Image (spheres, grey):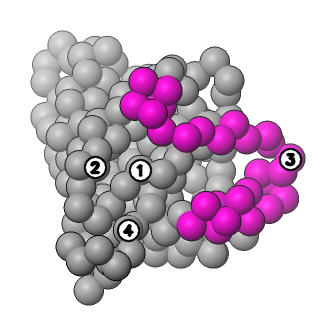
Amino acid sequence: MSENQKRIRIAVFASGNGSNARKINEHFSHHPVIEIALIVCNDPEAGVLKIASEQHIPTLLIEKNRFREEGYLSFLQEKKIDFIVLAGFLWKAPPCLTRAYQGRIVNIHPALLPSYGGKGMYGMAVHRAVIEHGEKKSGITIHFADDAYDHGKIIFQKQIDVVENETPETLAEKIHILEHNWYSKVIEKMILDSEK
Ligand code: GRF
């Protein structure tokens, strides 16, 4: 990379344990072009904030009304954020944000969209529904995000089998492994392709 090459800055939005955020940070920690510049979180108690502090990544704690009204867009632009990665972020992104970052905001969902997505479909609720419906496959979906829950063009899916005697807990574990294996790689490819 030439000294003048612009670095590409990602903000990771996460409100939970942050295991995906951790993997993403690790993946890009020595990347020649891409860096994780900010962790955005709406819960002061979220595990992801501890990870951000361990990994020395600046954080922004957000508040619901301002997020709904202007999506912290001015702040993100001021920090020169190029891409937004949603990794366990439960609030719906407002239209002003998804429009400004159209094609540059991605989400991961722990099932094969368009099935088992939408409002209330997060965490164990997703895996419970998959098992209750007797599905033989589940998996992960990485997609561009728009202002509807779990909606937007699909970039990548990976399937796994739902085995006999599967429980929501065992399925969640398998899905998390898939997420950790794939999310960073898919983000990297999407960003580098979009810069071509
Ligand atoms: C992941 O399962 C992801 O698919 C969903 O939220 C969960 C976040 O898990 N969007 P973690 O906080 O990264 O462990």
Is the C-beta separation of discs 2 and 1 under 8 Å? yes
Cα separation, mark 3 vs mark 1, equals 25 Å
Horizontal side of residue 118 vs 175, given as left or right: right
Look at the image and give the residue range highlighted in magenta. 52-80
**Quadrant of the drawing holding the N terminus:** bottom left
Question: Under tag 4, what secondary structure?
Answer: loop
Q: Which mark is residue 28?
A: 2
For discs 4 and 3, the disc positioned in front in the rendered view: 4
Q: Quadrant of residue 46?
A: top right
Placement of 176 over or under 3, stated as above or below: above
Give the x, y percent position of residue 151.
50, 61
For discs 3 and 2, the disc positioned in front in the rendered view: 2
Q: Earlier in the sequence, mark 3 or mark 2?
A: 2
**The furthest residue to the bottom:** 196
Please name whichever residue, 185 or 154, is drawn nearer the observer in this view of the structure: 185
Q: Earlier in the sequence, mark 2 or mark 1?
A: 2
In the rendered image, which residue does mark 4 sit on? 7
Instruction: Establish whether ligand 1 lies closer than 8 Å to the Cβ of label 4.
Output: no
Please name whichever residue, 193 or 155, is drawn nearer the observer in this view of the structure: 193
Cα separation, mark 2 vs mark 4, equals 12 Å
Residue 76 highlighted magenta (yes or no): yes
Please name whichever residue, 138 or 193, is drawn nearer the observer in this view of the structure: 193
Amino acid type shown at disc 2: Phe
For discs 3 and 1, the disc positioned in front in the rendered view: 1
In the rendered image, which residue does mark 1 sit on? 36
Seen at 32% across and 52% down, the residue is 141
Amino acid type shown at disc 4: Arg
Q: Which mark is residue 65?
A: 3
